[in-house]
Structures are given as structure tokens and as C-alpha cells.
Amino acid sequence: MKQHRIVPILLLSLIAVVMTMTGAGCSKEKFIPNTKVLDSDLNREILRVVEKYRRAAGRLDKVAILALIHPTYQDHGGTPEGGDDVDYEGLKTLLKTRFARTSKIRMRIEYRSVEVRGREAKVDTYIDATFVYDQPGANPRWRRLTDFNRFKLIRENKRWLFIGGL
């Protein structure tokens, strides 16, 4: 009779060890809804800043966008040439000229990952943007831009601000 009790106990113990080793029965990692980003207070805080940018861009609100930019902002435009590099002052000018020729923007951002190291964060995204852009000598027309993008932010005075990637 004792032997019959030992077999189920050994079997249950073996199943528990196997489940622990394979990860079965363990809680799965949770992601922020509609993203591929692990759910944490820090990641949510960072994504809220990027969402503020997205909404401000949709309103063509350059003042709100500039409020999210760190004075050391620097973007190399993804090319080795320096002609397309943009710093904080250049971003002000770029927003002014581009928004003057843009009448509507709709931007969807797919959040793929957030990486934080010390005071800096990188947010990898896929952007799908449509907008109406006026060109000299032509009728305004809808355009579409889709691309992978990396936003770079820095934490200063308890705020996350962009230092690159717009």
C-alpha cells in the first residue's frame, strides 16, 4: 500500500521539476497592450512622451513638440553626409518650414522595443504616417511615409526629452 503512494508522489515531483525547467506554469512576460514592449512603469513613462510627440505632430503643434526636445538634440538623418544633420536650432527651422506646407498629419506608431541605459533610452518603432503636403506649382496631395525609426531620449529633471530620432 505504501508503494502505491510513493509512485504518484514521485511522478508529481518529476512533473513539477520538468515544468519548472521548461518554464511551463511560470507567468509569461506581460507587454504593454498593442505593443511589443515589456510592461513596466518606466517603459510606460517613456512611451507616454513619444505619444505626446505623436499627438502634437497630428495637431501640427511645433510649440508642443519643441517642449519635448532637449537642447542637445542632434540627428544625423541616417546618412554619412553632414548636410542633413539637424540640431535643436535646425529642428526649430525644420518644423516651421515643413508645418507651413503641411495641412494634415495622421501618424501611427508601432512600438517594438524600449531599451534604457542609465539616463538614456532608445525606442524602436515602425511609423506609418500620411500627410497632406503642399508643393510649389502643384496641388496639395496626400503622401505616405512608412519606415522603422529609433527615438532617442534622455532623462533630465524628472522628464524624458528627445535627443534624436524625430
Image: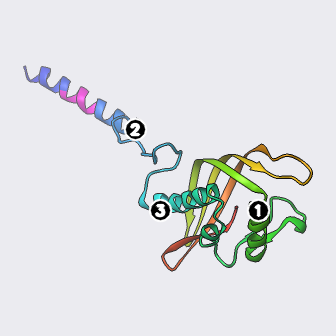
Q: Work out which residue is located at the far right of the displayed protein and give it.
A: 137
Residue 127 on image: x %, y %? 67, 47
Which residue corresponds to mark 2? 23
Residue drawn at (35%, 34%) of the image: 19
Residue drawn at (66%, 67%) of the image: 62
Q: Work out which residue is located at the far left of the displayed protein and give it.
A: 1
Identity, as a three-letter code, of the amino acid under mark 2:
Gly
Residue 85 on image: x %, y %? 83, 68
Q: Earlier in the sequence, mark 2 or mark 3?
A: 2
**68 drawn magenta:** no
Q: Nearer the viewer, mark 2 or mark 1?
A: 1
Give SS at disc 3.
Answer: helix
Residue 90 on image: x %, y %? 79, 73
Give SS at disc 2.
Answer: loop
Which residue corresponds to mark 3? 45
Q: Main secondary structure of the magenta part?
A: helix
Residue nearer the viewer, 154 or 48: 48
Question: Circle 1: is it few (<14), some (14-19), or many (20+) Cα within 10 Å?
Answer: few
Give SS at disc 1.
Answer: helix
Whether residues under marks 2 and 1 lie with C-beta atoms below 8 angstroms apart, the answer is no
* Snapshot quadrant of residue 23: top left
Residue 75 on image: x %, y %? 76, 67
Q: Nearer the viewer, mark 1 or mark 3?
A: 1
Which residue corresponds to mark 1? 100
Residue drawn at (75%, 70%) of the image: 91
Which residues make up the magenta segment? Answer: 9-14
Identity, as a three-letter code, of the amino acid under mark 3:
Glu
